[in-house]
Each structure stands twice: as C-alpha cells, then as structure tokens.
Image (cartoon, rainbow, N blue to C red):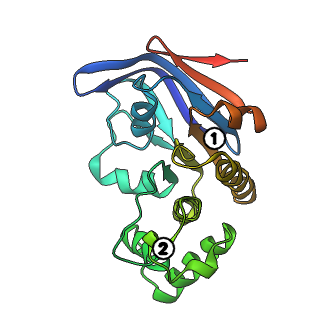
Amino acid sequence: MSNVISLFGANIYQQDQLILENVDLELAKQSFAYLIGKTGTGKSSLLKTLYAEIPLREGKGQVCGYELHGLKRKQIPFLRRKIGIVFQDFQLLTDRNVLENLKFVLGATGWKDKKGIEQRALNCLQLVGIEQKAKSLPHMLSGGEQQRVSIARALLNQPELILADEPTGNLDPETSKEIMELLLAVANEENTSVLMATHDLQLMQAFPGRILAIESQKLVERS
C-alpha cells in the first residue's frame, strides 16, 4: 500500500451536521501536506475522522491500512498506534514529568517491558533534542519545549502518519520555525508522513509543500 491516507467520496459530520462533503484525499507514504481553511471550516473534524474520533458514516476511507467505515471500537487503539497526533495546546499530563508523560503513553498503548519503555521514551526525547528536560514538569518548560515533548510523544510508536493540528498556533514566529524544522526533520528520519493543519502563511512560505484547502465544505488541492 503506497498511501497512508485514502478517502473517496467521504461525507464528514459533526453529530448530525454535514461539515465536509464528497472528500477525496490521498496522502502517499513519507510525504508532507498542509491542510488549510478558515476557523470552523472542518480542519479538526477531518483530522478527527482520520484518527477515528469521529466515525466515517458515508464514503470510503483507509488510514494506515485500517478501513474507517465500519471500524470496530476494539480496532481503534491499533489504528492509533500507527498515528502520532500533535495538538496546538500540547495536552501534556501536568502532574508528571516529561519522561513519565511518554512512559504513560507507551504503557497505555500496550508496551509491557519497563526497560524497553524507558529506552524508547528517552530515544524520542533525544530525537527532538530535549532529553535534558526529562525530569522537568510541563509547567517548567517554554511553549516550544512543550511542543517538542508532544512531538516526541507522537513518535513513540514509530507511526506511519503524524497528524498535526495547528502545532505552532500558540508559539511565536521564531519558535514556530524551529518546531517546523524539527517536525520535518524527524518525519524524514523516521519515514513518517505528515498532514498538518495550519493558519500560518509565513510558515507555509518558508517551508513550501502540498496544500489542501477547505472551501465551501469541499477539500480542494491548491497548486
């Protein structure tokens, strides 16, 4: 399978409201694309459909080898092990340090070996250049450092796909550029595809890539 994402004729709903209609989307392995659109047009809904937070009711969809239409609840954790998710607001657990945040996720996704858990967590922190903060609590870190941790967390299970939802939305321009460079570098190193929702036109000019835009409930490719 050469695509990590394949959607055909997908209608995406929030509860009973149609948000996006007749979505066709293919994302090849080891590729990068931006997802753009005004606030409230359905970027997050599309990403949530891809990681099965929102069920796909109509149309065909496959992500990392899993059929989205009719996906069983017990299959969702296995799909999510193949996807790393990076959020705008970091979503780190505030009551435990950076290393414990990562170890918690590994335990929750089925890892059993304590030494293996510790080693993988440290390896991912090294990948994003923040291993020296392993024992720090999230509130002791800058926004950029917290986002580095959340990228490390997204990489834990060596995902085929990273979905990044406005990952630089809470960061200043210089830090945003650093995070973007990091995201592209680690995705390249780990052979991971990236679909990134963003509003940041400066970032898109600095790091040109494929652009998918949501306009009038449709997904269109921008040249």
The residues bearing labels 2 and 1 have C-alpha atoms spaced at a distance of 43 Å
Q: Is residue 51 visible?
A: yes
Report x, y in % for residue 97. 44, 78
Q: Is residue 60 found left or right of 55 in the rendered image? A: right
Judging from the image, what secondary structure is the residue with disc 1 in? Answer: loop
Q: Amino acid at mark 1?
A: Met
Please tell me whether residue 139 is drawn above or below residue 13 in the rendered image.
Answer: below
Q: Residues within 10 Å of mark 2 (few under 14, many from 20)?
A: few
Report x, y in % for residue 46. 44, 31
Q: Amino acid at mark 2?
A: Met
Instruction: Identify the residue under disc 1.
Output: 1
Q: Quadrant of the C terminus?
A: top right
Q: Report the disc number at residue 140.
A: 2
| x 57%, y 21%: residue | 213
Q: Farthest residue toward the left?
A: 16
Q: Is residue 122 visible?
A: no
Report x, y in % for residue 193. 65, 45
Compare residues 14 and 176 and report the one nearer the observer. 176
